[in-house]
Amino acid sequence: MYDFLIVGAGLFGAVFAFETAKKGKRCLVIDKRPHIAGNIYTENIEGINVHKYGAHIFHTSDKAIWDYINQFAEFNNYVNSPIAVYNDELYNLPFNMNTFSKMWGIKTPAEAKARIAEQIARLNIGEPKNLEEQALKLVGMDVYEKLIKGYTEKQWGRPCSELPAFIIKRLPLRFRYDNNYFNDRYQGIPIGGYTQIVEKMLANAEVKLNTDYFEFVKQNPNIAEKTVFTGAIDEFFGYKLGELEYRSVRFETEVLDEENYQGNAVVNYTHRDVPFTRIIEHKHFEFGEQPRTVISREYSAEWKPGAEPYYPVNDDRNNSLYKQYEKLADERGNVVFGGRLGMYRYLDMDKVISLALDAVRQIQ
């Protein structure tokens, strides 16, 4: 009945459906959730476009991808400039001269570099054996203790001394007064939220929500010539080689009877004793002036089957296991695996679009 069964109505599946529809292909898109757009889904609450699955700021240095996404929505000029809270101290992110000036009372890049170099030399760390040593060797004690240690331990659910060094290969230090988190040329938030973008992409596809792929395909084994699968690749193969590991995130969203709760869209809480990693105030993504506000607290959580997987744990063991699943996928032949879960790697939105476009180019 269909050329493609697309499993997952997120960004990868939606781009694939949009592009293949232009080629005259018939697509059926299914999703186990009750809504389209996957993790970039935005829901209007109190006139505010709430990022239901965490903050999504579109950024890219690829003009072709920027032009591509702008055909579906107009983007504003939002610039991501997070703030970090450590006890009663406030710091700008990413690590830049505003951060160093607040931390040490210095003014010049030379002073900041000297302070960091002095701390690193005092620690006398050789080849880093773990994440803690890696971070200390890159930024010294003060930045690590206040802005990295607690946040990272909450994210991964274990002490930094027990985490592999490769997780932090580099920590960018900016010796200029610049709070723009991303270096990409293009950045913004779609005015009106992300869901509208996926709606437009899926306009020429048939969509079935609240639909589990494994149950659906049992009842409809010959529904399409090919499958595009954006779920977890190990689940697709029945975990026959073992389970890949993920970290999950739990959200607590609250409507507050005040206009402005924290004055910024993203505020990280870097002390280990604060249970959540950050608070998102959604109205600030679109410069909202609504009389009330909506905030979401984010809690990092262990992932277990049945929970929503968010971040692949790309250590040596998991990457090796993924390669084995990737080999099974290649042997299968009639299934395209895409997206964060299908490819087992964290992907920014521009990379998802680029990979989906590449997948379309490769089809016969």
Image (spheres, rainbow, N blue to C red):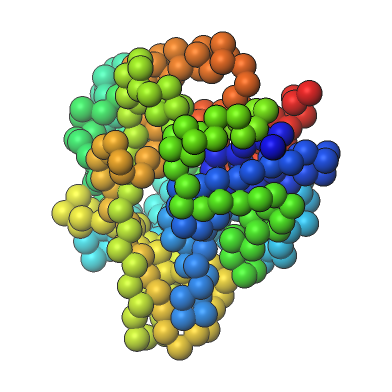
Q: What quarter of the picture does the C terminus occupy?
A: top right
In the rendering, at what x and y percent does residue 216 appear? Answer: 49, 39
Residue positioned 83% across, 40% down in the render: 24
Residue positioned 26% across, 19% down in the render: 129
Q: Is residue 212 positioned above or below 255 on the image?
A: above
Name the outermost residue toward the right.
23
Name the outermost residue toward the bottom.
291
In the rendering, at what x and y percent does residue 260 appear? Answer: 41, 80
The quadrant where residue 84 appears: bottom left
Q: Is residue 44 positioned above or below 275 on the image?
A: below
Q: What quarter of the picture does the N terminus occupy?
A: top right
Q: Is residue 200 positioned above or below 309 on the image?
A: below
* In-image side of 304 versus 222 (left or right): left
Residue nearer the viewer, 310 or 289: 310
Residue positioned 65% across, 32% down in the render: 224
How many marks the image carries: the answer is 0
Name the outermost residue toward the left.
273
Residue nearer the viewer, 83 or 24: 24
Residue nearer the viewer, 328 or 323: 328
Name the outermost residue toward the front.
219
In the rendering, at what x and y percent does residue 75 appear? Answer: 68, 63
Q: Is residue 310 positioned above or below 262 on the image?
A: above
The answer to whether residue 59 shows anywhere in this view is no
* In-image side of 166 versus 8 (left or right): left
The answer to whether residue 300 shows anywhere in this view is yes
In the rendering, at what x and y percent does residue 18 appear? Answer: 73, 46
